[in-house]
Amino acid sequence: MPTENSQPLWQPDARRIAEARITRFQTWAAEHHGAPATGGYAALHRWSVDELETFWKAVTQWFDVRFSTPYARVLGDRTMPGAQWFPGATLNYAEHALRAADTRADEPALLYVDETHEPSPVTWTELRRQVGSLAAELRALGVRPGDRVSGYLPNIPQAVVALLATAAVGGVWTSCAPDFGARSVLDRFQQVEPVVLFTVDGYRYGGKEHDRRDTVAELRRELPTLRAVIHIPLLGTEAPDGALDWGALTAADTEPVFEPVPFDHPLWVLYSSGTTGLPKAIVQSQGGILVEHLKQLGLHCDLGPEDRFFWYTSTGWMMWNFLVSGLLTGSTIVLYDGSPGFPATDAQWRIAERTGATLFGTSAAYVMACRKADVHPARDLDLSAIQCVATTGSPLPPDGFRWLHDEFAASGADLWIASVSGGTDVCSCFAGAVPTLPVHIGELQAPGLGTDLQSWDPSGNPLTDEVGELVVTNPMPSMPIRFWNDPDGSRYHDSYFDTYPGVWRHGDWITLTSRGSVVIHGRSDSTLNRQGVRMGSADIYEAVERLPEIKESLVIGIEQPDGGYWMPLFVHLAPGAALDDALLDRIKQTIRANLSPRHVPDEVIEVPGIPHTLTGKRIEVPVKRLLQGTPLDKAVNPGSIDNLDLLHFYEDLARKRS
Ligand SMILES: CC(=O)CC(=O)O
């Protein structure tokens, strides 16, 4: 597999290698913890998984993690699921995120940018003051450790303040982006029963204002556990009846008080849609996220106080939480609230230029869109501060690597391209950026430290240079401590551990190459994953099948060779119905209003029927495989299908599309 690509596209120079934090960490860990001093990253990685406890102890020391109560040991129990990290320890995530306020008081912690592209700084002192004020108000409102605090907010400074204030009091943060419809938000927030809701009145996107006051009113009606609603007047409206005003709650000059919480105390709930049922409500811990993100951002992304970290994301995606954790490394983080391509495709590059971003993260799809639109960011803009362009959401296709490389090389820049992959489930990366390793086209540089990433065949044999299931054979601190709405842990177990007992199976196809790099090939199950946003097909069925004209439907998503994602919705119509423009519009409108614009399919295709298993389950994976070109006899077991003839339609469609 790796031989076609034997020459790296990029190689870090000696200065970059010597100055990288990961190099300095390795030298220090060799002196203090017995890590290998030679052998480069491969040796360090091997050590980090073989000596897992020593590695994580070293991470806490290197990053000076402040334990309020010391830990008894690093790993109490390493069984997955249920590994116990740093038992006995207490600490607080928010305290670490605000540490740079002690030394860089007047420098920006946040650079906020809206669609005017004018950056507004929030200094470390100001961020710390607002968090202090809001944390005191949350306590006064009766918020106690473990209470859930929710945000229906765009990517604005107030969202960061609310997350940190919640963490400071030991509350559990959870957020949805305001382009989510009421049903999507309620499917998430009703599971966790928040006591506080932070909300905007609306948001601006693509040059337009989107008033969300009706949705907010619906959320308030349908979330009976709310004790307080805090109104952030992004569109300038008055706080509705009974809502508190953001300005009043963040006005005091109050030092934050950080609740020392157990290492495995919940920090936040993230959501990830599976194929059925409500979105999984994934709970990650304060300590687990703290150490994983210090490792990932401080060592792999090489971020520190001199950096400006910009990742294009919304609050509904784990990359937002990852971006906020940039504060842990003392970096300034760049928050952009707006359309990725407004007023033109190059918008994100312009924001990177205006903010002096040193690490610019985006989706692989955005890179491909720029290439297609003939954008020349490095030629037309001053991007000299950028050291690294990172991508995620889907694997960066080879043409994306070449385009980025050539664009920057032509302007004399030495660009490190990091394609990274992980997921909401661990709020981090399994593989991706390593500043000291070469980059090969189409490949992630290497598995992350402390992550025993492997590719397994169905019998659990490790594969090299062959496609297999992505598995992680050791616990990672940011793996979920549990799912919120899952008292016996069965949904958590079934999501990752039912294929290979005791081993995390992620649901991606992966190749580990013999040179140590990684190729991700897309989902190995039927989860929809559109540029990193995972969606449940069941949500789409529920919305669309409310229309009387739709008898049944089936949605799949296919990763395209150019990095795009094709998400067709197949509809079997009720007798007498016709898929005309009016019905098409209503289908799209229903999905947009009930779920979100991201759920709207790329195409709606009428089909003679939806195939099922003999037990009546729609067969999404076989249809996906047929459309990816797998022959029918390999895509399905014919004996397990209720109406095999229906599959010929999808087979024909695949032929026509190829
Ligand atoms: C890091 C990631 O894997 C982000 C995503 O694509 O969900």
Image (tube, helix red, strand yellow):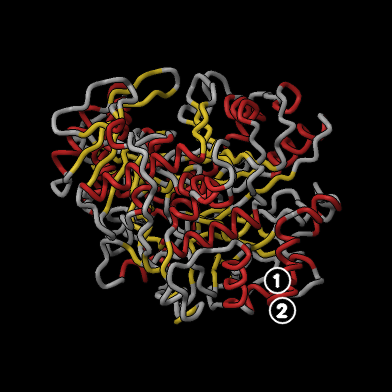
479, 613: nearer the viewer: 479
Q: Secondary structure at mark 1?
A: helix
Query: Looking at the image, which residue is at 26% across and 61% down?
Result: 485
53, 533: nearer the viewer: 53
Query: Looking at the image, which residue is at 58% across and 71% down?
Result: 56
In the picture, measured across the screen, residue 197 lies left or right of residue 469, that is: left
Q: Earlier in the sequence, mark 2 or mark 1?
A: 1
**Which quadrant of the structure image shows residue 636?**
bottom left
421 over 80 or under it: above or below = above
Label 2 and label 1: CA atoms lie apart by 6 Å
Residue 453: x and y in percent read: 60, 68
Q: Could you tell me which quadrant the C terminus lies in?
A: top right
Q: Could you tell me which quadrant the N terminus lies in?
A: bottom right
Query: Looking at the image, which residue is at 30% across and 64% down?
Result: 614
In the picture, measured across the screen, residue 137 lies left or right of residue 333, that is: left
Q: Which residue corresponds to mark 1?
A: 29
Asked whether the residues under the numbered discs 2 and 1 touch, taking CB atoms below 8 Å apart as contact, a structural biologist would say yes
